[in-house]
Image (cartoon, rainbow, N blue to C red):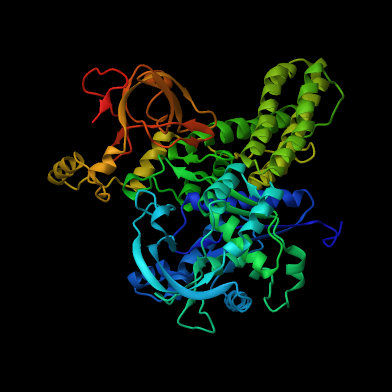
């Protein structure tokens, strides 16, 4: 099939913000997109894979000033670092766009003017509460505990002249589109969130320019304004493939648009499923076929701190484990819908068990036995037995199973299917015992057939593995050939000692509380005995009185399926029982929870966590290391007693 005959597949990541070096959670997205792009290529698609960097905004201007460089110098350095890490992770993107590219900036100006001329953009004044890190305005009602609903940071009052986009003009049309295209926003929980929290309550007009800073794309007909971040950043998906607002778009744009998949983090789903589709409607362009808001990859307990050594960067992890091991971990450990967790300890465990043992040892044994018993070459002697049939069935069914998982973007499940094949091959070795067959010359044909079957199974798995662990896939296939193996097996993954790894990690990230001498150590210990947290705004007695706290008794508790963090407790409060979901699985087992008397915020609005309804909140204390302790009454109190 020629390139022109192949069906196209246009996939994008969100463009990375150039405020600093990306950590492994940021890097996860490019690896996920790469796995999808590579897999689509194996299915015969003509794939175009775009990524890049988002380089404008007030935060960049401030960071550049702090660093004593120009904003352009600052973003040049950070963008180069992001690209280095994307390349380090063996990602096969076709284009790396920067929003400081001249052709992109020129099109942003033309798009702004086009929307202004057709009446979708108008000039006014904006007064509201502004979050600098998110570069977003919010109303008082949109805040969460008085802070930014997206990042949780402080907001500041701001007022300035601005241009606005008439979002409400297109809101009904977008609601209708989402209802008619259930596949547009995935997972479904993200769609429900956007509809219920933003679209159905009604959209406010969107601020699309700023005058309080200069680092942005100027509005060419009103140069004291710069284009606000989302109208600039989101349009990269079309400018990067040749869109022209004057109607002179390239053949590449006509071929590739609409995008088949926008792969983004769940924190920016609103911008990609509300703002972006409305911009496209205003431009008269079709909407992307699908927007997938993936969950987050969290470091340990989710709180990143250099002093605690739990900020993980891709290049550091690669130094310890290698590129493909890191790719395997971030892809395999991320659930479809819920957040995943990464720690040094978990990385070592997965490398030793899954990669060194299940996969590496399997290949090593097969190559070694083929060399030992047959000089490195085997063929199918037809000496089949009933035990072979199940292995062959798994070999034949795995590609279809992987296809099904990948078609629904369940990448972690696809990898699990491949490793189930490798596990079946290991079981086949235990069932057939080649070393025992080798002792009987009359069973030589059977032995050769067994090794042939093993090579077929491992080769099938290795070919499927190419999208996820490309280097490892090539190494395995190079060792196995078509039945002629290499003289010596190559060690794919070296087992690691956890204590040694953690010692090296400690050297990389020494604990901040460790003092240089005993005197400083004592002072640090005294300081560690107390914790200062950022104070929240004062509340009135009436506000406090609106919260209902009672003693509850946990009468049942179980783990929440498909969640590493959540426990679901049935809590008796007076004569009623409430179901409460808490992120405390790392600190308590279900068995430990049952029978405890706990303090409960009873009148918290019910919400679903990982698909499970939670009707309140258990109160906990947290120390500087992230350890949690349930708050319990000092004396035995009956379930339902008021806490006042």
In this orientation, which residue lies closer to the viewer: 48 or 215? 215
In the depicted structure, whether residue 321 falls above or below residue 575: below
Residue 128 in the image: above or below residue 510 = below
Which quadrant: the N terminus?
Answer: bottom right
Answer with left or right where residue 163 lies relative to residue 540. Answer: right
Residue 625 image offset from top left, x and y in percent: 31, 39
Q: Quadrant of residue 192?
A: top right
Q: Is residue 596 visible?
A: yes
Q: Nearer the viewer, residue 98 or 398?
A: 98
Identified at 36% across, 54% down, the residue is 153
Q: Residue 478, position in %: x, y? A: 71, 44
Determine the image quadrant of residue 131: bottom left
Left or right, residue 256 beside residue 410:
right
Q: Nearer the viewer, residue 615 or 508?
A: 615
Who's the residue at 63% across and 34% down the image? 359
Quadrant in the picture for residue 369: top right
The answer to whether any part of residue 459 appears in the image is no
Residue 487 placement (x, y as % from top left): 70, 38
């Amino acid at each position: 099939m020629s390139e022109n005959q192949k069906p196209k597949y246009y996939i994008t990541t969100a463009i990375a913000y150039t405020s600093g070096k990306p950590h492994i959670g940021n890097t996860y997205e490019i690896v996920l997109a790469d796995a999808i792009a590579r897999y689509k290529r194996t299915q015969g698609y003509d794939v175009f894979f775009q990524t890049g960097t988002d380089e404008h905004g007030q935060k960049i201007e401030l960071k550049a000033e702090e660093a004593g460089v120009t904003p352009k110098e600052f973003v040049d350095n950070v963008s180069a670092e992001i690209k280095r890490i994307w390349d380090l992770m063996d990602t096969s993107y076709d284009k790396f766009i920067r929003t400081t590219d001249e052709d992109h900036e020129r099109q942003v100006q033309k798009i702004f003017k086009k929307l202004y001329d057709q009446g979708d953009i108008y000039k006014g004044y904006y007064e509201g509460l502004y979050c600098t890190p998110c570069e977003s305005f919010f109303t008082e009602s949109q805040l969460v505990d008085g802070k930014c609903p997206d990042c949780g940071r402080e907001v500041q009052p701001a007022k300035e002249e601005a241009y606005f986009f008439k979002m409400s003009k297109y809101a009904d049309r977008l609601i209708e589109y989402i209802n008619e295209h259930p596949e547009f926003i995935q997972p479904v929980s993200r769609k429900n969130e956007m509809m219920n929290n933003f679209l159905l309550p009604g959209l406010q007009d969107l601020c699309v320019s700023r005058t309080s800073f200069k680092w942005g794309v100027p509005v060419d007909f009103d140069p004291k304004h710069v284009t606000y971040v989302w109208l600039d950043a989101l349009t990269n998906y079309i400018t990067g493939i040749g869109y022209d607002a004057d109607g002179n778009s390239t053949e590449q744009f006509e071929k590739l648009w609409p995008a088949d998949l926008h792969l983004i983090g769940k924190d920016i789903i609103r911008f990609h499923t509300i703002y972006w589709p409305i911009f496209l409607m205003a431009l008269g362009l079709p909407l992307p076929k699908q927007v997938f808001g993936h969950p987050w990859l969290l470091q340990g307990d989710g709180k990143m701190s250099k002093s605690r050594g739990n900020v993980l960067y891709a290049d550091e992890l690669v130094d310890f484990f290698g590129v493909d091991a890191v790719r395997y971990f971030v892809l395999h450990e991320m659930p479809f819908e819920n957040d995943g967790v990464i720690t040094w300890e978990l990385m070592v465990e997965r490398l030793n068990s899954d990669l060194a043992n299940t996969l590496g040892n399997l290949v090593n044994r097969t190559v070694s036995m083929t060399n030992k018993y047959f000089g490195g070459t085997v063929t199918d002697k037809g000496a089949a037995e009933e035990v072979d049939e199940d292995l062959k069935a798994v070999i034949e069914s795995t590609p279809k199973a992987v296809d099904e998982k990948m078609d629904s973007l369940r990448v972690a499940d696809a990898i699990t299917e491949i490793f189930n094949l490798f596990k079946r091959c290991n079981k086949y070795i235990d069932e057939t015992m080649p070393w025992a067959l080798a002792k009987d010359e009359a069973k030589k044909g059977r032995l050769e057939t067994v090794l042939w079957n093993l090579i077929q199974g491992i080769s099938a798995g290795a070919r499927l593995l190419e999208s996820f662990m490309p280097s490892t896939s090539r190494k395995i296939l190079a060792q196995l050939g078509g039945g002629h193996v290499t003289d010596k097996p190559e060690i794919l993954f070296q087992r690691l000692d956890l204590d040694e790894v953690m010692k090296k990690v400690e050297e990389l990230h020494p604990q901040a509380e460790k003092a240089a001498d005993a005197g400083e150590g004592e002072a640090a210990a005294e300081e560690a005995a107390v914790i200062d947290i950022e104070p929240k705004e004062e509340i009135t007695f009436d506000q406090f009185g609106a919260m209902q706290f009672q003693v509850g008794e946990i009468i049942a508790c179980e783990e929440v399926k498909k969640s590493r963090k959540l426990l679901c407790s049935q809590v008796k409060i007076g004569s009623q029982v409430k179901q409460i979901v808490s992120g405390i699985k790392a600190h308590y087992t279900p068995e430990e929870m049952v029978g405890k008397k706990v303090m409960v915020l009873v009148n918290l609005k019910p919400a679903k966590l990982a698909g499970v309804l939670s009707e309140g909140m258990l109160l906990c204390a947290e120390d500087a290391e992230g350890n949690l302790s349930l708050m319990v009454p000092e004396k035995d109190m009956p379930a339902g007693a008021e806490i006042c």
